[in-house]
Amino acid sequence: MKRNYKILVLVLLLAFASCSFTTKTFEDPDKDKLLIQVITYVLQRGHFDPKEINDDFSAEVFADYLDQLDPLKRYFYKSDIEEFEAFKFQLDDQLKEYDISFFNLTHDRLVQRIEESKAIYKEVLDTPFDYSIDEEFNSDYENIGYVKNKKQMKERWRQQLKFSNLVNYDDLMSAQETSEEKKTLTEIEAEARAETLKSIDLYYNDYIDDLDRQDWFSMYINAIVEEFDPHTNYFAPEDKENFNQQMSGKLEGIGARLSKRMDNTKIVELISGGPAWRGNELEVGDIIMKVRQEDEEEPVNIVGMRLDDAIKLIKGPKGTTVILTVKKVDGTIEDISITRDVVEIEETYAKSSIVEKNNRRFGVINLPKFYVDFEDYKSRNAASDIKQEIERLKAEGMEGLVLDLRNNGGGSLPVVVDIAGMFIKEGPIVQVRATGEPKEVLKDKDKSIVWDGPLVIMVNELSASASEILAAAMQDYKRAIVIGSKQTYGKGTVQNFLDLNNMVRNNKNGDLGALKLTTQKFYRINGGSTQLEGVKSDVVVLDRYSFIDVGEKDQKNPLPWDKIDSVDYTFWDGYFD
C-alpha cells in the first residue's frame, strides 16, 4: 500500500504545517515533548477510527501503563499508586499540552523502587526456605493489591521467590535419585537458592539494568497509542530498523546473533552464509570485548555496554570492515577482521518439499510471512519466491499443492495479491476501505496461472492479516480447501508504517522513530470482514492454539466487525473438493 502511505504522509504534513503551534513547539529542545506532539496529531488525523482523548481515555492509559511497569506488583507501594492517581484523569490534558510530568514522576519512582528491590531479593535469598510448612501463594497479580510497607514488600518477594525456587529444588531432588553423590536436603535447598539468585541476577543485569529512560518512555508512548487498537504501535529508532529487517528478511552486518550475559556480549548463533560464518573464525560462545572500525585507530570497549548499543557498533554497511577483539571459548583473545555484507535470514523465507503418499507426489510450501523489501519491491519477496518454489515442485511432478500459512502473522498486502493471482486467471482479491473514503478493490490483473491443480491452504489461530486475505480469497473463489483451526486470528485491519521524522521539518532533536498506524480495514471479496471472525476452515483440525485465547477478539481495544457490499467474481471452474 505504498501509494496510500505516501498520500497519508502528504495529507498529514500539509495539515501539520498549517497548525499555528508548530513553530513554537519545534523549537522546544525536549525530544519527548516533540514526540508526544507528533504522535497525538497523527493518531487524531490518520487513524482509521480515532478515539476522543478525554478522561475515559486517560483512565485507560493510566491503568495499562502502570500494569506494564509493574505487572507482578513487586516494585510500587500503595502510597506510590495513591500519588500517581492524582494524574488518572489528567493524562488527556497533559497530552494536549505535551506535558510529560506524569511519565517523569513514574519513571523516577520506578528507578528508585527497582534499586530497592535488588537489596530485597538478595536478602530474601540469603535465608533458607522452609518447605515443611503449609502456606498459600496468590499468583493472580491482576487482582491482588499493592503492598503498604517494606515488611509486606519483603513478604511478597519471599513468596514469589519461594514459589519460583521450587522448580530448581524439584530438579535437584530428581537428579539426586540417579546421582551417586548424595546431598542432604539442606545442601539441595541452598543450591536451589543459589540457582534462583543467579537467574534473577541475570534478569536484572541483562534486561532491567539495560533499559534506559528512552526505553521506558517508549513503553509510555505505546500505552497511549495501543488504546486506539492493538496493532497501532510506536517503534523507537532501533526497533524501527529491526522491523524493517524482519519484513525484508535481510540486514547488513557480520551475520551473527548476539545476546548479553552479565556484562558480556556473547555470540549465540552464526547465520549460515553470512560473513562471520564464511570466515570460520568466530564461534558460538565467543565473547566480543572490543569493536574497532577500519577507519579508526582505537577500539571501543563494549564490556558492560547495552546490547543495542554494542550491536550498532558491530553492524554496518556492506563492504566496510570491523575488527572484533574476541575472547574465544578456550580463553584465548584474538582480533578478528570481518568485512560486512548483506545477510539473508533464511528462516524468514519460503521453503518447499515433496511428500510422497500412496505413490502420489504432493508439494508443500511453508511461508513464515509475506516478506518484502519496502525500499525495493522488485527485489526478493514472498511472491517471487513462491513462484520459484511452485515451478520447482512442478518440475518434480507434484500432483497437488499444500500452502502452509500456520503461524504466519502477515506482511505486505501487494505481495498477497501477487500470490493469490498465481492460482486464478484474474479478478479481485481483497477490498480495502479507509474512513470517509470510497473502497478500493485490489485485483490480480495478470492472466497467467502458475498452478492450476488441487490446492490446500493450512491455517491455525496464529494465521493473521495477509494470511487471512489469501485464505479468504481462495475460499471465496472455491479455488482451495482451507484446513486447520476453527477460525484464523481475526485481524482485518491494514497498517501503514509512518516515519515520524518525515513529519518534522528541520528536526534537530534526533531520530523520532516510527508509528505503525491502523489506517484501513480490508474485506473479503464477498463483502465480509475478517476482523474478529477470521476465516473459518472447511476442514477443522485442532492444534495446541485452539485451547488458549490468542485471537484478535482476545486483545484489548480491537476494532469491530462489519460488512460492505461484495464485488463481482467468478468461481473457479476446476474446483477440487
Image (tube, helix red, strand yellow):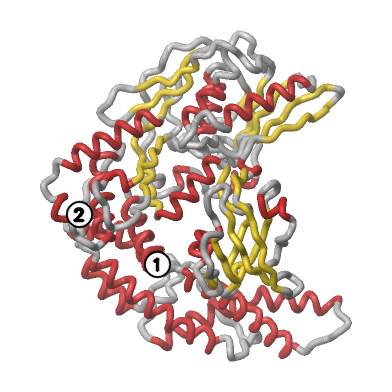
Label 1: few (<14), some or many (≥20) within 10 Å?
Answer: some
**Label 2 close to label 1 by CB (< 8 Å):** no
Q: x, y percentage for residue 545?
A: 60, 46
The residue that disc 1 covers is 69
Say which residue label 2 marks: 26
* 181 lies above or below 422: below
Q: Mark 2: which amino acid?
A: Phe
Q: Residue at x 51, y 69 (%)?
A: 207
Residue 509 is left or right of residue 462, and the answer is left
Residue 470 at what x, y percent from top left? Answer: 54, 27
Residue 185: x and y, percent? 74, 88
Residue at x-position 24% and y-position 47% = 505
- The amino acid type, in three-letter code, at marker 1 is Leu
Query: Could you tell me if residue 89 is visible in this image?
Result: no
Q: Residue furthest right?
A: 180
Q: Quadrant of residue 169?
A: bottom right
Q: CA distance from mark 2 to mark 1?
A: 29 Å
Classify residue 113 as left or right of residue 282: left
Percent x, y for residue 310? 52, 64
Q: Nearer the viewer, mark 2 or mark 1?
A: 2
